[in-house]
Image (tube, helix red, strand yellow):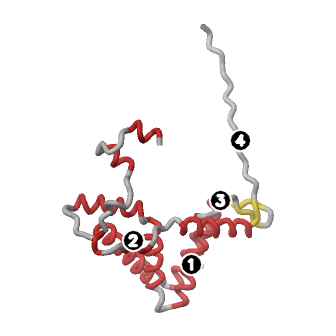
Amino acid sequence: MPSTPTSVTTATYTTIPIAGGDVINRSVQNLYTFLSRSRPWPELIAGASAVDIPTSFSDAAIRVRRNFKYFSVNYVILISGCAACSLIGTPILLIFACLIFASWLIFLFFREDPMVVLGHQVSDLAVISGLATVSAIVVWYTGILNSLMIGIMMGVLLSVIHGGLRNPEGLFVDEDDAVSTGLISNAERGSS
């Protein structure tokens, strides 16, 4: 039986470039959507009943992993707040850091469509290069790095301590863990 060549048709997708102002508006909307996924703060803080010392290091690691999945947006807000608090002593540095942070969020992370400047589409590499250059210049000339790193490390430390001490039982059921412990079967998981 002779084989006949088959032609494979590939679809070509293009995006319609939009103006810079629309990119910023969509990015800000995406930021609000991201922040709206945070868990209620009273649930994060919870009473003493939800806090206990883990029995082993592996138990603490599992708690941290589960709590990071569940409270990830809250932890991002906490770390950002600690970083901002570390710069309160020098308000000019805080303003520069907020501007740089907002620029990265708006122009890269929460942007959905290609950026257009003066009628020309700007590539992601150019956006990243520009943001990295501006960030490096601000960090170099303001000396913000030490203060900012202390704040970020404090936020990460607080998040890890909370994640290790906060008992995640009763918050949610992880499907993979439920299947491995026999709580549900793979057939039930596939049908839901």
- Cα distance between the residues tagged 2 and 4: 45 Å
Circle 2 packing at 10 Å, graded few (<14), some (14-19), many (20+), is some
Cα–Cα span, label 4 and label 1: 39 Å
Q: Position of residue 28 (x, y in %)?
A: 64, 70
Q: Quadrant of the N terminus?
A: top right
Question: Which numbered disc, 2 or 4, marks the residue closer to the eye?
Answer: 2
Q: Nearer the viewer, mark 1 or mark 3?
A: 3
Give, as a three-letter code, the residue at label 2.
Answer: Leu
Q: Earlier in the sequence, mark 3 or mark 4?
A: 4
Query: Reading the chain from its start, which is encountered first: label 4 or label 1?
Result: 4
Looking at the image, is mark 3 or mark 2 earlier in the sequence?
2
What residue is pinned by disc 3?
Answer: 112
Mark 4 near mark 1, Cβ–Cβ under 8 Å?
A: no
Name the residue type under label 1: Ile
CA gap, disc 3 and disc 2: 31 Å
Tell me, yes or no, whether the two marked residues, 1 and 3, touch with CB atoms within 8 Å.
no
Q: Which residue is mark 4?
A: 12
Q: Please tell me whether mark 2 or mark 1 is closer to you in this view.
A: 2
Which mark is in front, 3 or 4?
Answer: 3
Amino acid type shown at disc 3: Glu
How far separated are the C-alphas under marks 1 and 3? 27 Å
Foreground: disc 3 or disc 2: 2
- Name the residue: 52% across, 65% down: 37
**What residue does disc 2 label?**
44
The tag on residue 137 is 1
Question: Please, what is the three-letter code of the amino acid marked with disc 4?
Answer: Thr
